[in-house]
Amino acid sequence: MKQLIRNILIALRIPVTKNIHYDILTKKLMAKVLKSQSNCIDIGGFKGEIMSEILKFSPRGRHFIFEPIPDLFKNIEAKFKNLGNVTVLNLAVSDKKGTSTFKFVPDYPAYSGLKQRDYPDNNTEVKEIEVKTDRLENVIPDNIKIDFIKIDVEGAEFLVLSGAVKILHQSKPVVIFEYGLGASDFYGTEPDMMFNFFEASGYGIFLLEDYMKNKPHLQKDSFGKQYHEKLNYYFAAAPV
């Protein structure tokens, strides 16, 4: 029932929570940048909702969805099994190939990640599982131009991006990513690190609303303010 209500609010574009507001803006941004044949990557697939939206905008594209939690991966795999243009991988995207312990949160699976982070409940149960890891540029074929990447990995965003440098430089995709206190700080990632990384790749970081309205990207100090004052935690990065 909660999911149904959420879907209705998003469809009606009623931003009663910040998460729903971001979901609405994400769909608007995808409508702006995606074409029928665009190729996309969804990192942190969860229930496959973003990929379902991607397929509406880009039914002729080649798409990849990553989900490390085994049960969620199986559900996503079953959801898209009849689509030849969607590849589902049971993998945690990171900066190196191998295996890693992964903090699975049964009561709040969306908070699961490679490291422990802040949770809604101080008594939250956390289980350790082992997952495979790999760099994005090791997995995505070199002959596929990527147009759009969504990253929602509960603090490990910089690890994901560090393994995707070649893709950013060659394909210049638009990137939507979550980045905020309570998650990324457990990975030792400071705003300056994220800003400098994108700047070195020829990218600017935007508030979603600003990107939609073709406004200028954030400067280093203003991006840091967004982060430290918890003003926003979802951003777009695009070539400038």
Image: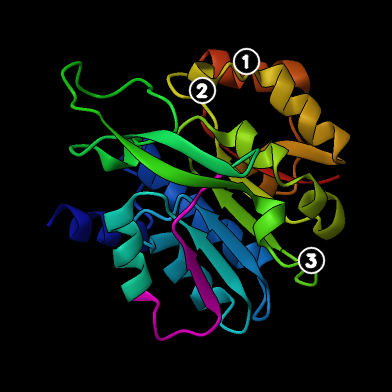
Extreme residue toward the left, this view: 1
Give the residue drawn at x 78%, y 31%: 197
Instruction: Name which of mark 1 and mark 3 comes first in the sequence.
Output: 3
Q: Residue at x 46, y 84 (%)?
A: 83
Q: Amino acid at mark 3?
A: Asp
Please, which residue is most extreme toward the front here?
98
Q: Earlier in the sequence, mark 2 or mark 1?
A: 1
Work out whether residue 72 or residue 30 is closer to the camera in this orientation and state it: 72
Q: Which badge, 3 or 2, comes first in the chain's sequence?
A: 3
Alpha-carbon span between mark 1 and mark 3 = 37 Å
Question: Percent x, y for residue 111?
Answer: 34, 35
Amino acid beneath label 2: Leu
Report the residue marked by disc 2. Answer: 231
Q: Is residue 86 magenta?
A: yes
Q: Amino acid at mark 1?
A: Lys
Q: Is residue 215 left or right of residue 40?
A: right
Read off the magenta span: 79-93
Which residue in the structure is indicated by mark 1?
225
How far separated are the C-alphas under marks 3 and 2?
Answer: 37 Å
